[in-house]
Amino acid sequence: MNWFAISATISAISAVISAIGILVNAIVSKRLANMNRQTTLDVNSENRQTTLEINKINRDLSEQLHQLALSRAKREQLLSIWKEMIVISRISSEDPNPEEVRIALNLLNLVAKCAELELVDPKDLQEMFGRVFVDIYNDIYAISKPITIGNTTKPGRDYLADTPRLKAWYDKWA
């Protein structure tokens, strides 16, 4: 056999082996790249899911904090109304003091507006002030002779009629 032919055959086999090695390397690289890409997609998907879960927890917590702050603000409103309601006295229909009637009307309006706007829970207002609200409303309604508040002179029921919300809450709480 010719050494030249053997050498050429070995070179050809070596080239084929090198080509096979390059192809195997390319195939393995491609598979690794695909695996890496899939792993990255899986991780990104998990990160997105985790981020969504964290965002939901943050939203829920923010809503709870908001409700807590709102509840506290409502309680503070209730306390300021309470301070006014405990000092209000019954009004005499025979000899009403116009200043007491004015204060009582303003206070009834405040309670009714707080209930209407739900600044304070209407059930809490009714529980705490409903009876006083109804009693004072009845006292003012019973004033039949005209009294002067500011520049206006009229009977108590007419002052009450000026604000329909008072009658609406009176009807609910009476």
Image (tube, helix red, strand yellow):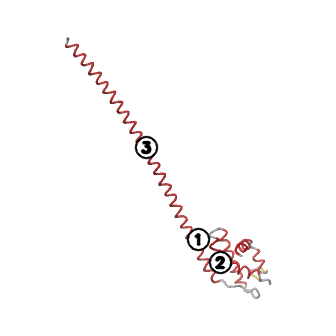
Instruction: Pinpoint residue 129: horizontal percent, then vertical percent.
Output: 65, 77
Q: Distance between the residues labelled 3 and 1?
A: 48 Å
| Label 1: element kind | helix
Q: Name the residue under label 3.
A: 42
Mark 2 Cα-neighbour bin, 10 Å: few <14, some 14–19, many ≥20: many
Q: Is residue 51 above or below residue 157?
A: above
Q: Name the residue under label 2.
A: 129
Where is the C terminus found, in terms of image quarters? bottom right
Amino acid type indicated by mark 1: Lys
| Label 2: element kind | helix
In the image as oriented, which residue stretches furthest toward the bottom? 95
Amino acid type indicated by mark 2: Phe
Residue sitting at x 27%, y 20%: 13
**Viewer-side label of 1, 2:** 2
Mark 1 Cα-neighbour bin, 10 Å: few <14, some 14–19, many ≥20: some
Residue sitting at x 38%, y 39%: 36
Q: How many labels does the image show?
A: 3
Mark 3 Cα-neighbour bin, 10 Å: few <14, some 14–19, many ≥20: few
Q: Mark 1 points at which residue?
A: 74
Q: Distance between the residues labelled 2 and 3?
A: 61 Å
